[in-house]
Image (cartoon, rainbow, N blue to C red):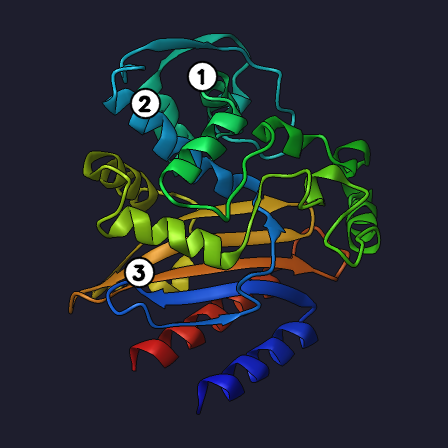
Amino acid sequence: MNTARLVADLATELDEGGLRGSFLVRDLHTGREVGIEPDLAFPLASLIKVPLAAVTLDRIRRGELSGDDVLEVRPGRDSTPGGTGTTRFRHPAWVALDDLLSLALTISDNLAADTLFGLTPPAEVTRALRDWGLRGITARHLVDDLARTPEERFEPDRAHLAHSLAIGAATAGRGHHIPQLDVTRANSGSARAFADLLQALWTASAIPDEVAGRVRELMAANLIRHRLAPDFTSDAASWASKTGTVLNLRHEAGVVEHADGRAFAVVALTESHIPAVRQPEAETLMARVARLQHDHLRW
């Protein structure tokens, strides 16, 4: 099947499954790629933790910070149901900077990430990305803001109403009445922009080798593996990634490395048009679409 036909068929499949997405799969060695609306901007949700980690690690490399710096983490700032790591703590704790990085990327700990943002604010993260030649990702706010959506105002059995609002309140220009879903106010980027970041982390680039290597290591240790990981992990392939979720948005971005030496960046940013909190079918569909694009490139 030719690429144009594949993309059209997959876009139709997404639409029929209640999803719209920005997808891109790129061969990191040849640069060949295939995508579905790869330049469509999305709020990034927890994907912003990847550039945050890279910039923090670069500041450690330059001696501005130290990995063994111990920082106070105070609970109560993030009340999101299902929060992980320090967001579940009931008492103040002191955690080393290196360990906050690990918590932010491996279990998507929001409070750990915002403690890092306290050292390197969003504007500085964006500026560092630009210095590395990465122009498609913009950091604008703390991760804690993702826990202040309409969903938190409803009882659990009525949370679907927040998803109805999320679906219905968008504008044609990618704006939104909910700021966390407005690409002009939220941390934002496209599938192509995130693939560029992954390429910079996995191949020679302006990002120093020791920084890129540590980010790769942390992404490989990601424990959230229900979305794309089942389609990209095997005895002959490794998968390193980061997920992102807020309201009706479900994302994952990662790199699959095959035993034959080939490596592919895989980015799937999606929004659902079905007002339901739990949608395992959406997780399965986005993984299927990403895998079919990968296989088209690989074979």
Q: Could you tell whether 122 is left or right of 219 in the image?
A: right
The structure residue drawn at horizontal position 32% and vertical position 22%, both measured from the top left corner, is 59
User: Which quadrant of the rendered structure holds the N terminus?
Assistant: bottom left
Viewer-side label of 2, 3: 2
Q: Amino acid at mark 3?
A: Val
Residue 294 showing in the rendered view: yes
Q: CA distance from mark 2 to mark 1?
A: 10 Å
**Label 2: element kind:** helix
Residue 107 showing in the rendered view: no
Labelled pair 2, 1 in contact (Cβ < 8 Å) = yes
Q: Earlier in the sequence, mark 1 or mark 3?
A: 1
Q: Residues within 10 Å of mark 1 (few under 14, many from 20)?
A: few
From the viewer's side, name the closer residue of 18 and 2. Answer: 2
Which residue in the protein does label 3 denote? 256
The structure residue drawn at horizontal position 40% and vertical position 10%, both measured from the top left corner, is 71
Q: Earlier in the sequence, mark 2 or mark 3?
A: 2
Q: CA distance from mark 1 to mark 3?
A: 31 Å
**Label 3: element kind:** strand
Q: Is residue 146 above or below residue 253?
A: above
Quadrant position of residue 72? top left
The tag on residue 215 is none
User: Which quadrant of the rendered structure holds the C terminus?
Assistant: bottom left
Q: Amino acid at mark 1?
A: Leu
The structure residue drawn at horizontal position 62% and vertical position 23%, both measured from the top left corner, is 78
Q: Residues within 10 Å of mark 3 (few under 14, many from 20)?
A: many
The tag on residue 119 is 1
Which residue in the protein does label 2 denote? 59
The structure residue drawn at horizontal position 53% and vertical position 64%, both measured from the top left corner, is 38
Q: Is residue 153 above or below residue 192?
A: above
Q: Position of residue 81 (x, y in %)?
A: 64, 33
